[in-house]
């Protein structure tokens, strides 16, 4: 039941994002449109940014970060859910969505690297992960907002080819 309620609230947020930016939407409006009480919203999410992050994580968690096909599928999903991701990338609030996205991917790649290395990561590897995540997040934004031609598979392949050599060796041998 709780999961269905979260999905219902998220779908309501997506409808509101068609007309307004994240900053312009208020929790009261989300509740009114979803036909729920404010305590119900706050039972599931601490604020609208937590809701947006949850929405993003639902898609991102299903992605195999080391698979071209899986990453491309996720990017195609982003394109099909264009308004949500456009609004997320445009967010200039105190806690912008791109920062949630960045930290999510840094944590996922760091966990993968630790698992592959079988040990704690050195400072250079941590730096390389962060740099790669910044770059791929920025290029994904650019692709989504400005490039209607290049297939997602091509973008993902270019990202993988641009991965720092130390990470490439760690992840792909």
Image: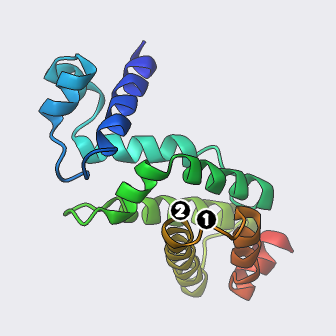
- Mark 2 highlights which residue? 105
Report helix, strand or loop for mark 2. helix
Q: Is residue 59 left or right of residue 62?
A: left
Left or right: 150 in relation to 88: right
x, y percentage for residue 67? 78, 59
Q: Judge by depth and name the residue closer to the eye, 117 or 73.
A: 73
Tell me how far mark 1 sits from mark 2, CA to CA.
Answer: 6 Å
Q: Which residue is mark 1?
A: 109
Proximity of marks 1 and 2: CB atoms separated by less than 8 Å: yes
Which residue is painted at 52% across and 66% down in the image? 106
Q: At 25% from the left edge and 66% from the top edge, which residue is drawn? A: 92
Taking the image as shown, residue 20 lies to the left or right of residue 136, namely: left
Quarter of the rendering occupied by the N terminus: top left
* Neighbourhood count class around disc 1 (C-alpha, 10 Å): few under 14, some 14–19, many 20 upward: many
The quadrant in which the C terminus is found is bottom right
In the rendering, at what x and y percent does residue 27 appear? 17, 35
Q: Residues within 10 Å of mark 2 (few under 14, many from 20)?
A: many
Q: Residue at x 58, y 71 (%)?
A: 147
Residue 158, horizontal then vertical, whole percent: 73, 78
């Amino acid at each position: 039941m709780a999961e269905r309620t979260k999905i219902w609230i998220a779908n309501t947020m997506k409808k509101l994002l068609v007309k307004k930016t994240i900053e312009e939407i208020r929790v009261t409006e989300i509740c009114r449109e979803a036909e729920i009480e404010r305590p119900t919203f706050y039972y599931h999410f601490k604020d609208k940014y937590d809701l947006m992050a949850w929405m993003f994580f639902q898609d991102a968690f299903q992605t195999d970060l080391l698979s071209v096909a899986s990453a491309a599928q996720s990017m195609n999903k982003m394109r099909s859910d264009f308004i949500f991701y456009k609004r997320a990338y445009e967010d200039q609030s105190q806690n912008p969505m791109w920062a949630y996205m960045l930290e999510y991917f840094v944590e996922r790649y760091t966990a993968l690297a630790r698992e592959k290395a079988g040990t704690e990561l050195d400072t250079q590897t941590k730096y390389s992960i962060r740099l790669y995540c910044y770059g791929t997040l920025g290029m994904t934004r650019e692709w989504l907002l400005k490039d209607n031609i290049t297939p997602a598979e091509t973008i993902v392949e270019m990202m993988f080819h641009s991965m720092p050599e130390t990470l490439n060796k760690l992840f792909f041998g």
